[in-house]
Image (cartoon, rainbow, N blue to C red):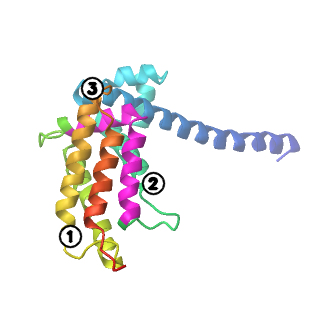
Amino acid sequence: MTSADKGSSATVRPRRGGSYAVGRARRARILHIAMEEFAENGYRGASLARIAERAELSQPGLLHHFRTKEELLAATLDLRDEMDVERFTGADGAALAGVAAMEALVDLVERNQRVRGLVQLFTVLSAEAATADHPAHAWARNRYRRIRSFIAEAIRAGIASGEFRSDVDPEAHAFRVVALMDGLQQQWLVDAEAVDMGAVFEVYMRETLEAIRARRDS
């Protein structure tokens, strides 16, 4: 191989790495645009052609990254779930528990008021996914189970650590917390001027924590 050949091959490797980075960036851009499209139009009303246009791609270019609309939806929901998991994990990588977990839920609701598109995505798809034949049906069901499980486990951990009373029912509280969060999100999307979901949820959680905290002798 000549020195010229070596120089030529040396310039190829960075291009391959650069091409990979560009592909990852393009995929991420597609997912965020798809989030907006699914949030605005639901799964059935979303258009791959419109997503491709907004991403400045041809439809075949979009299908190079995601072969079907179902695959794109699944990747979008996975991304949203990853964003949620990060919010409920401590610095040591373990799931938050007890009072810290409950306070993280308050932070989540307050943060959601600044990301309307994500709230709308979840609300629209959850409503659509009530039918068993919807591509997101299993995701919605499993997500509700996972959220309730996280809350219930956090309360159990609080009981074990002595933060919460031993007679608290973790599952019952988990159902109530999720029901309030969803109900507030729906009302906020319809009438944001009248509904401060962060403030309402913060009061509810403060009252709940006061009710379930273990009483300590003075």
Q: Earlier in the sequence, mark 1 or mark 2?
A: 2
- Tell which of 216 and 103 is nearer to you: 216
Q: Which residues are magenta?
A: 99-126
- Tell which of 123 and 142 is nearer to you: 123
149 versus 191 height, above or below: below
Q: Quadrant of residue 205?
A: bottom left
Q: In the structure shown, which secondary structural element does the residue marked by tag 3 occupy?
A: loop
Residue 78 visible, this orientation: yes
Residue 100: assigned label: none
Residue 58 visible, this orientation: no
Task: Work out how far the residue at label 3 is from the one at label 1, CA to CA, in angstroms.
Answer: 34 Å
Residue visible at 24% across and 42% down? 182
| Identity, as a three-letter code, of the amino acid under mark 1 | Val
Residue 127 on the magenta segment:
no
Q: Which residue is mark 2?
A: 86
Q: Earlier in the sequence, mark 3 or mark 1?
A: 1
Name the spot of residue 214 as percent of width and height, x first.
Answer: 30, 73
- Tell which of 63 and 85 is nearer to you: 85
Q: Would you call the spot at circle 1 few (<14 residues within 10 Å), some (14-19), or many (20 or more)?
A: some
Q: In the structure shown, which secondary structural element does the residue marked by tag 1 occupy?
A: loop
| Identity, as a three-letter code, of the amino acid under mark 2 | Glu
Name the spot of residue 163 as percent of width and height, x first.
Answer: 34, 72
Q: Which residue is mark 1?
A: 168
Q: Which residue is mark 3?
A: 191
Q: Main secondary structure of the magenta part?
A: helix
Task: Work out how far the residue at label 1 is from the one at label 2, CA to CA, in angstroms.
Answer: 27 Å
Residue visible at 37% across and 36% down? 118
Q: Nearer the viewer, mark 1 or mark 2?
A: 1
